[in-house]
Image: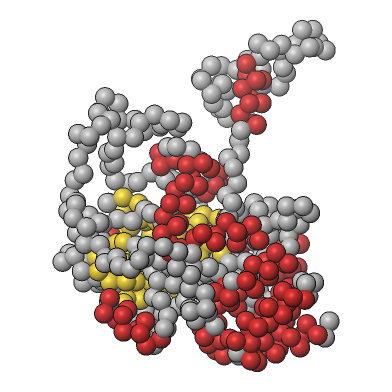
Amino acid sequence: MTTSRFTTASGIPVADDQNSLTAGPRGPVLLQDFHLVEKLQHFNRERIPERVVHAKGSGAYGTFTVTHDITKYTHAKLFAQVGKETETFVRFSTVGGEKGSADTERDPRGFALRFYTEEGNWDLVGNNTPTFFIKDAIKFPDFIHTQKRDPQTNLKSPTMMWDFWSHAPESLHQVTILFSDRGTPDGYRHMDGFGSHTFSMINAAGERVWVKWHFKTQQGIRNLLPEDAVRIAGVDPDYAQRDLFHAIETGHFPRWNVYVQVMTDADRIAWEQRTGWDAFDLTKVWPHADFPRIPVGVLELNRNPQNYHVEVEQAAFSPANVVPGLGFSPDKMLQGRLFGYHDAQLYRVGTNHQHLPVNRPRCPFHNQQRDGAMAIVNPGAAPNYAPVQAGGSDSRGFGHGDRGWVVEGVAGHHDPRGIADDFTQAGNLYRLMTPDAQDRLTTNIANSLRDVPEDIQQRQLGHFTKADPRYGAAVARKLAAR
C-alpha cells in the first residue's frame, strides 16, 4: 500500500509528524518548528463562526426534474421544458438550537434549497412550515434572542419565549404549528417544505404572478410524540442527520413533489378585500380552496457530501439569489432577509464565500469583484471596472423583463397591531385538528407555560381564546391542574 508524501500546506515535505523540534530530549520546543506552529495555528482556526440560527443541519445533493409546464407563469430557464433536470443542494436544519443540540427538539426545521441553473444559483430558503412567527424583519433579532439563552443564566428560558409571543399576537398561527405534532418531525425525510414567503414569477411577456412554493414529501408525514422526541434526544441526538445520510447511502433516495400556488394581482386585491388578510403577510397561508396547488416537478436527493465542513457547514444560502423569471414581493420579512442572509455569510464564511465549490454557480460568472480573503477564482488581467457589461438584461423596472410592482402610500412606520387579524387562521388550524391532536397541542403548550409568570400566561391565554374559545379553555384547564 502506497501513501502520499506528507507536506506542509505549502507543499514542503515534513520530516517528522510525531515529535516536535526540541533543544535536547526534554526541550524546550524550538520556535523554528514551523510544521508544529502551522499545525496548531490551523487547528485553532478550523471552525468558522456558528450560524446564529439554523446552526445544526444536514445537507445532500440531488436533482430537480420538471414534470409540468409552467412557462405561462415564468421564463426562468430551469422550467423551460418538461423533463429538464437541474442539480440541487439542500440543507435541512433545526432553528433555535446550537450545533450540539438534539435533532428532535421542538423547533421549526429549515428547508433551504439551491438550484444550480444555467443562469446562476437560485436559493429558495424556507422552513417546514408555511408561516413564521413575525411579519416584519425589525423584530427578528429580538425574536431569535428569546429562542437562545438567557444572558445571565445562559439557560433556555420559556419566560423569554412566551413573553415575546404574548406581546406579538401575530405569532399565534406559528406557535400553534410549533406546539402541534408538526413541532417534532420524525427526521428530515418525513416532513414537507415551504418557501413560506410570497415570491413572484415573471413570464416572457413581463407579466407577474405572486406564488408560494410547496414541497410535499413522498415518504409520508411522520412526527414524533413528545416522549419519543425526548428519549431519542438522549440516546441519539443526531437522529435526523443519521437517518438522512444512511437513507441516501443505501439508495433510498428521498423525494418531494413540488407545487406552487399562484395569485394574480387582480386575485390578490379581491382576496384581500374579501378576507381582510394581507397576501404578503408571512404569518398567513393562502387557503388551498382559494388557490389550489399546481404541480411543477420532483425534487430527489441522491448524493451525500464527501466533507461535511466544506460542503454543508460552509454552504451559504441567500434568498436574494434569484434568476431571471423569478422575483420577490413586498413581504416585509422577505425584504429584510434579502439583506440579512448575504451579510451573515460575509461575516460567517468570508468575503468570497461564493467561490467555494458548494456555493459556486455551475455557469460562467463575470463581475468586477476582486481581492479579499479566499479570492480563489480570480479573473486575472480582466478589468475590475465598468467595461464588464450586463448581458441579456432588459434594464427597465427590476431588469430581466421584470417591470416591477406599483409602490404607493405615505412613507413611515406602519403598525398593523390592532388592525390585522392574527387569530382566525390560528383558530382554523385548531379546528382542523382531530380531538386527540388538539389534546396533544394544548398539553404541549401547558407544559411549556407551566413555570412562566402568571401575567404572561394570562396574556397568552387571551390570544388562544380569541383564536377559539375551546383552545384557550383547554390550555387554561391544564395549567390550573398543575
Q: Is residue 8 left or right of residue 361?
A: right
How was this image coloured?
secondary structure
Q: Position of residue 297 (x, y in %)?
A: 34, 69
Residue at 38% across, 59% down: 63
Q: Position of residue 415 (x, y in %)?
A: 48, 70
Residue 287 in sight in this render: yes
Q: Position of residue 243 (x, y in %)?
A: 60, 62
On the rendered image, what quadrant is the N terminus found in?
A: top right
Figure disc tally: 0
Vertically, is 7 above or below 311? above
Q: Is residue 94 left or right of residue 274?
A: right
Q: Is residue 24 left or right of residue 414?
A: right
Q: Is residue 436 left or right of residue 210?
A: right
Name the residue nearer the viewer: 193 or 285. 285
Residue, far top: 24
Residue at 73% across, 52% down: 151
Residue at 56% across, 21% down: 8
Residue 356 in sight in this render: no
Residue 377's image quarter? Answer: top left
On the rendered image, what quadrant is the C terminus found in?
A: bottom right
Q: Position of residue 307 (x, y in %)?
A: 53, 44
Vertically, is 355 above or below 409? above
Residue at 73% across, 60% down: 156
Vertically, is 268 above or below 382? below
Name the residue nearer the viewer: 330 or 96. 330
Name the residue nearer the viewer: 350 or 5. 350
